[in-house]
Image: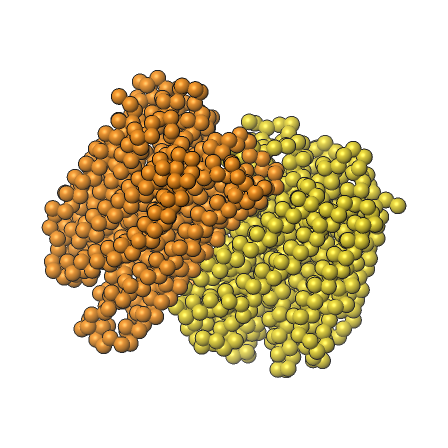
Chain colours: A yellow, B orange
Amino acid sequence: MEFYFYSLIAGVIALLFSFGFAYSVLRKPEGNKKMQEVSQAIKLGAKGYLSRQLKVIAAFVVVLAIAFVFLPNGVDISIAFVVGAVTAYLTAYLGMNVAVRANIRTTKSAEDGVHKAFSTAVHGGAVTGFAAVGFSLIGVSLLLLYLGTSNVLLLIGFGFGASIVSLFARVGGGIYTKAADVGADLVGKTELNLPEDDPRNPAVIADLVGDNVGDCAGMAADVYESYSVTIVAALLIAVGSAAAGAATSLLAYPMYVLSIGVASSIIAMLFTRTRKQNMSVALYKGIGSAVIIAALLDLALTYFTGMPIGYFAAVLAGLVLTIALFWITDYFTGSISKPVIKIATAAKGGAGTDVIMGLSVGLKSTWPSVLAVVLAIFVSYESAGLYGIGIAAVGMLSLTATILTIDSFGPITDNAGGIAEMGGAPASVRSATDKLDALGNTTKATTKGFAIGGAALSATALFVAFAQAVGITSLDALNPLITIGIFIGALLPFLFSSFLMEAVGHAANLMVDEVRRQVKTIKGMLTGKAKPDYAKAVDIATVNAIKALIVPELIAILVPIAVGLVLGKAALGGLLVGMIPASFVLALFMANAGAAMDNAKKYIESGKFGGKGSDTHKAAVVGDTLGDPLKDTAGPALNSMIKVVSTISILLAPVFVAFALL
Amino acid sequence: MEFYFYSLIAGVIALLFSFGFAYSVLRKPEGNKKMQEVSQAIKLGAKGYLSRQLKVIAAFVVVLAIAFVFLPNGVDISIAFVVGAVTAYLTAYLGMNVAVRANIRTTKSAEDGVHKAFSTAVHGGAVTGFAAVGFSLIGVSLLLLYLGTSNVLLLIGFGFGASIVSLFARVGGGIYTKAADVGADLVGKTELNLPEDDPRNPAVIADLVGDNVGDCAGMAADVYESYSVTIVAALLIAVGSAAAGAATSLLAYPMYVLSIGVASSIIAMLFTRTRKQNMSVALYKGIGSAVIIAALLDLALTYFTGMPIGYFAAVLAGLVLTIALFWITDYFTGSISKPVIKIATAAKGGAGTDVIMGLSVGLKSTWPSVLAVVLAIFVSYESAGLYGIGIAAVGMLSLTATILTIDSFGPITDNAGGIAEMGGAPASVRSATDKLDALGNTTKATTKGFAIGGAALSATALFVAFAQAVGITSLDALNPLITIGIFIGALLPFLFSSFLMEAVGHAANLMVDEVRRQVKTIKGMLTGKAKPDYAKAVDIATVNAIKALIVPELIAILVPIAVGLVLGKAALGGLLVGMIPASFVLALFMANAGAAMDNAKKYIESGKFGGKGSDTHKAAVVGDTLGDPLKDTAGPALNSMIKVVSTISILLAPVFVAFALL
């Protein structure tokens, strides 16, 4: 049996598990009528946004699919591209649709105790986690069957399809969620002194919708992309590195590792449960057990297939990197970590020193993650050459189902808290959802470290694949054209994220205006007698997120094409060389600065330095506001950007080789 | 006559002009007794800081000078190193000493009208501008005489000496000035509602001292370093590019261009005056005329020395880049520019949206500057090969005297305003110094664009020189060791600046505590009946700036050494490749974000959106506070960092070639 049948089976199993988890969540009871109203409003808002976003995505995908037909082997590339785009979208869509149903059920389960609610939220997250892995493995395996193993290069279309959807989902969702969040907080918390998720705040539904379209759909698409693109990169490198005829085993190995990842993630779900123990321990036990099981199985795989032990070392480097990134992110952004307390302390001097210290922590947090990735590259290369870098990335991403489960847990619990608050749930339920929400915040931050590191490693693998695709065996950084490419590459993440920050700032301001308007014009709103116009706020977030999508998308697509056409393939190689590390470090900075400032605010809210409502707290809220678009919009979107740029560079490599101005 | 005698003469002339300007400033009358008291306090504080900083610098310089003796040709390198360090320090010291005397005389001149004051401040700035150029040309020329033109490589010691002093001056001065500024503003403006430079604020003297040790001494050392290092890089590339025997004319050409720069700057001083016309027009006329005169003379030089016209094209690219960077920086940070108004508008939503938009503007501001530098590299390389990149940098830096004059104008006028305020000068004088201060703020921001761009271009030239020094003819970015170097290089500016931001945040907080303490304990201070304890605030800034110096210095010195020793010369090349663009873009982002947020605050203070004291203004003050260390500490210090890393890499190249672990 061809190797891709095994991965096909693994993919189908993953998908079945996803459906199983979905079933187990959906059969749970929903909450009372008031809660259902809230949940319904969130569902509608999220659907409304996704359907508008879909139109824009579809337009891009159709245009690109037609354009790709003109490439050599264009029809196959187009097919692969559409498969990639559709499966990515399905993952995001499915994950989000379950999440908006899991939230209310999590709230309801909390009536029977926090551990029941925990399990509901974890299962809700697992739907996305296993769907992502399932769709991707099925997609790649079927394409391998269709294209044949001698046309692996055409798979890049699949990777690019996943990338482009991810970019839209990350950028659009990121802008939406933070425009709503910042807008809701600025007036609600600061001016009106309303608590989080208070139903009297007109922007509150938009905020809850944002969690789903940003943290859930956006993150799902992002990780789906990392996973898919990593597979493609590893297969491309396998072809590029193999001596004639030896290719098949090099192709099979990463697919086996990924199949093992599915099995390990399934087994690990058994450990991700809790009765009496600490819930965060349960989550970390889940990840830890997945890593250990995967490592053992990978070792066995390497042994029984007779592959060099160096391959296993490379895969292990990827697995260890996963743990290291979790640990590092937790150190810098954990709720009572030293750096977070440092920021909270700085807030005593005012908002100015809070944000200065917050950015400082973000800047400093970059070094251990970069060093960890660098070590993984070093070890995997020394163990298995360039091929090692590809399979290290595969090893790391093989546990995607587990990581994404834990990540999607975040927005579900966040929403559950909101529904509890708005649905007037009893104090015991709220206390349970609050605990889950706090945990979800931490897991959201730590999985971001994984997503960013994974993107960096898979982009590095893509870079190797690019060089092989365009036939560059040496990329001379002393050639000024390449130097120019490197400069432009380093510039790209800064330029790209400027649009995202601007869009959030702009839309949040509109949201603030709208909330202030409603406060003035809707009588009785603040006393709870009249209902705010939630739909208007949802509309503002939707319209502005969609509007702001286009320019950054075009930058990510057109800049590499322009450089490739005008300055040639070597300069484009330079662009990748400049872009990957700069984006990686910038994304770490942004994500960690934001998460640390968020937790510094929460630290003060827990009663330290004067607690909620004190001047110190107000100062920390400003830091949190700045941190929001850093950690949830600009930072994560860079992941998608580097992969879009890398995949389109490979995809159009034949064009750049055949034709270049210089 | 050997070519370096001409540059020696140019250097001596520049130094004579510097002394002449100093004389013309010092013979002007000082202000009244109260002003003299203030001026005296600033002088003492600045001297106290510099003497403590000198001890740390001296320790580093002595240790390094001894260590360098063990290199091949070690004694000569050590001598060159000490010459570089001493001349850099002299420039900073002289410039600052005149600045702390020019400030009070500017205030006094303002009694006779704003144009008199303008001329005093410009002359004060010119002392630094011409001293920098003079010391550097004399130093290099004498070393060429001593070492002989066949040992140009040893000049790198000179460059590193200048770099190391610049790093100290930038880092220490930057932390000092912003700790004091932020501390003074946070309590003074926000809590106590005191105006800027109010004598009742205990941190006000420290703030004024900071302008001198940071913006004046720090900037002088930074630009001195750029100038010196650029000369060295150009000469190194000349040697590396020359066919046997042809080296002398390639060595002579850049030295002639620099001599022409001195002449052009002197002539341009005639245009930098004003009677009725707008003062900013006068300054820009100064720069414009310097560029035009230099271009014409360089054209003549190229023609009469029979050098290829392509050399002139490269020099011209550098000159045009100077203008372009001014214009770009002004567009993004000018006092009524569109991006600045955007930030001010965002402040209506609160401090959170203000800083979000501020960072967004900073991020976006990077692209035109990067593109301008990239174009200059492209044109100069196409015109004259790698040598072209060296002389383009020389062309750009040849007008250093003019640029530094305009830049040093800033802290002098800032201080003049402070002295007027604290010395109780009449309203007409204050209005004059306010106008000068506003202009000085703009010139400080725009010259920063020049300093950052100049650093990027000269670092690129240094990178070429490094490759030639270690005998790398091709630096393969596909080699994973080099990839690792690139990642570490991109990381470096983030890590480095994190320490600076942290130091400012920390010291500012201590300053806030101290000011609050004095408010509580010194009775009658706020009513003006009792004097605050200025010395205590000065002491806090001094001690904390010195303390925070060491770690970032060590990072800049030790990381490249470690990479060179452990991973080898190619990985070190990778480090430079990753570091230069990332630092460049990050520095632009930081400097422009800071300047734009500063001016957004000033825009509101001019009466827009509610004016001073409104909520919008308070929000903008938070942005300004964050912007302060971005624009005056972390951003500029990156300039020095990339040059220290580049020069030490070249300096120790023989060691890395002979010995590397991998």
- Rendered residue at 78%/62% (across/down): A266
Image vertical order of residue B211 relative to residue B574, above or below: below
Residue occupying the point 48% across, 38% down: B655
The quadrant of the picture occupied by the N terminus of chain B is top left
Q: Is residue A186 left or right of residue A279?
A: left
Q: Position of residue A575 (x, y in %)?
A: 56, 39
Q: Which residue does the image show at 80% across and 61% down from the upper left?
A: A17
Q: Is residue B50 visible?
A: yes
In the picture shown, does residue B71 fall above or below B431? above
- On screen, residue B56 versus residue A378, left or right, reads left
**Residue found at the far right of this picture:** A1
Q: Is residue B87 left or right of residue A167?
A: left
Residue shown at 22%/73% (left/top)? B525
Query: How far from the left and from the top, in percent, is residue B460?
Result: 45, 36
Q: Quadrant of the C terminus of chain B?
A: top right
The tally of labels here is 0
- Is residue A86 at all visible to an observer of this figure? no
Where does residue B355 sit, x and y in percent of width and height?
Answer: 44, 58
Q: Position of residue A278 (x, y in %)?
A: 66, 74
State the residue in front, A48 or A313: A313
Q: Quadrant of residue A401?
A: bottom right
Identify which residue, B326 or B406, lies in the foreground. B406
